[in-house]
Image (spheres, rainbow, N blue to C red):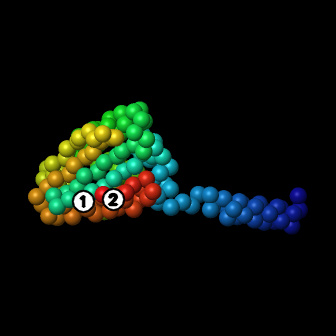
Amino acid sequence: MTLSFRLALRASATIVAFAATVCVAPAFSQTKQEHVHETGQAVMPFDLNRTTHAFRMTDSGGVQSVVVKDALDKGQIGLIRQHLRHEAEAFQRGDYADPTSLHGATMPGVSELASHHRKITVSYSEIPLGAAITFATKDRHLVTAVHRWFGAQLSEHGADARPE
């Protein structure tokens, strides 16, 4: 092979690699909401297409609930209850690993909730179409942390969530 042929071959390979990167890049770009929706199954056993997250901010913290869209979907209700029971127990211990694995460790409010978990009462309850987790504290700083965390989740879950 001549030197000029080898240089032309390398240049062609470089152009092809660049073109492939440019053409494929849009397929990898996605919004935070799309990322959370697509990777949610790794953290949550229920189907995000068949459920809705709801966030209600209260004077003492807030209530996070997950409900089915179809009242007859008993399988999803069971999965919601199993997951939220597990999450409530983890949050009471200051373990926010599941939400941070999905949303990131820098999510607003999470570090405060985890580091001051002993000042927050976390309780699980079943509701007719799913389950809920209630966060209650007398510490105003932690109430704000719950509200910031809920706001970030509302934003990142997009169409899969609603405020109450």
Q: Residue furthest front?
A: 71
**Residue drawn at (71%, 60%) of the image:** 20
Tags 1 and 2 touching, CB below 8 Å: yes
Task: Give the image quarter of residue 162.
Answer: bottom left
Q: Is residue 77 left or right of residue 50?
A: left
The three-letter code of the residue at mark 2 reads Pro
**Is residue 142 positioned above or below 129 on the image?**
below
**Whether residue 109 can be seen here:** no
The N terminus is located in which quarter?
Answer: bottom right
Across and down, in percent, residue 48 comes to 45, 46
Which callout, 1 or 2, points at the residue further toward the start of the chain?
Answer: 1
Identify the disc placed on residue 2: none
**Residue drawn at (41%, 59%) of the image:** 156
Across and down, in percent, residue 64 comes to 29, 51
Element at badge 2?
Answer: strand
Can you identify the residue that label 1 sits on?
57
The three-letter code of the residue at mark 1 reads Met
Task: Give the image quarter of residue 5.
Answer: bottom right
**Is residue 85 positioned above or below 101 on the image?**
above
**Residue drawn at (75%, 65%) of the image:** 15
Task: Give the image quarter of residue 137.
Answer: bottom left
The C terminus is located in which quarter?
Answer: bottom left
Q: Residues within 10 Å of mark 1 (few under 14, many from 20)?
A: many
Identify the disc placed on residue 163: 2
Across and down, in percent, residue 116 comes to 17, 55
